[in-house]
Amino acid sequence: ALEGTTFDAILAKDAMPPRSTQRTTMRFLGQVSSKVYVTDQHLFALLIFRMVRLTLSDGVCDESCGAFASLGVILNRVNDHPGRNAYRFGKLALALTQRLNARRIVPNVYMLVYGSLNIFFEPLQAVTDKLLEGYDVGLL
């Protein structure tokens, strides 16, 4: 589903309708995936792949940000040519979070991107500042 799709095309996708079945499905999958992560890594990957596919076919929503950040984490774990694509999906998740002004998902996305991806690619000082920022947003 991702082959031939550019990050710019994903960023330019329309938003899912607010009360659509697809958005409800994305929210449900996002909630379940965070619980499944610790118990079944294969099921976690399947849920994330489904979220990415829904995003590509039906548009973006807040949960799409977490899906792309999680996809980066998955790619990083399978030793993706020193994380090249993993890092790019983390950047996509951050850009999409900003584009959608998805404040409620910032703590989750920052934890995934800065806590699980960027620690391998950026100075520790930059990562810790962003993790603290995500923490502060979560307190509001």
Image (cartoon, helix red, strand yellow):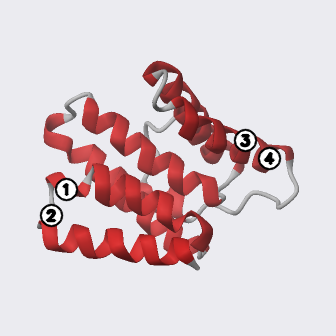
Residue at horizontal 15%, vertical 73%? 125
For label 1, count other residues whose C-alpha is less than 10 Å away and answer few (under 14), some (14-19) or many (20+): some
Label 2 packing within 10 angstroms: few (<14), some (14-19), many (20+): few
Mark 1 in CB contact with mark 4 (< 8 angstroms): no
Left or right, 69 with respect to 64, comes to left
Q: Secondary structure at mark 4?
A: helix
- Which callout, 3 or 1, points at the residue further toward the start of the chain? 3
Asked if marks 3 and 2 touch (Cβ < 8 Å), the reply is no
Tell me the residue that label 2 is attached to: 122
Q: What residue is disc 1 on?
A: 119
Q: CA distance from mark 1 to mark 4?
A: 32 Å
Q: Amino acid at mark 4?
A: Thr
Instruction: Identify whether 137 is placed above or below 116.
Output: below
The residue lying at 20 percent from left, 46 percent from top is 84
77 over 103 or under it: above or below: above
Quarter holding the C terminus? bottom right
Judging by the rendered image, the residue that carries numbered circle 3 is 28
User: x and y percent of residue 116 in the render?
Assistant: 29, 49
31 or 55, which is in the foreground? 31
> Given contact means CB atoms under 8 Å apart, are the residues at marks 2 and 1 in contact?
yes
Gap between marks 4 and 3 measured at Cα = 6 Å
Residue at 26% across, 27% down: 78
Q: Secondary structure at mark 1?
A: helix
* Residue at mark 2 to residue at mark 1: CA–CA distance: 6 Å
Q: Which comes before the other along the chain, label 4 or label 2?
A: 4
Amino acid on which disc 1 is placed: Ile
* Spot occupied by residue 20 in the image (x, y as percentages of width and height): 86, 51
Q: Return the disc, 3 or 2, that comes first in the chain's sequence.
A: 3
Q: Is residue 102 visible?
A: no
Image height of 40 relative to 87, above or below: above
Q: Nearer the viewer, mark 1 or mark 4?
A: 1
- Residue 83 sits in which quadrant? top left
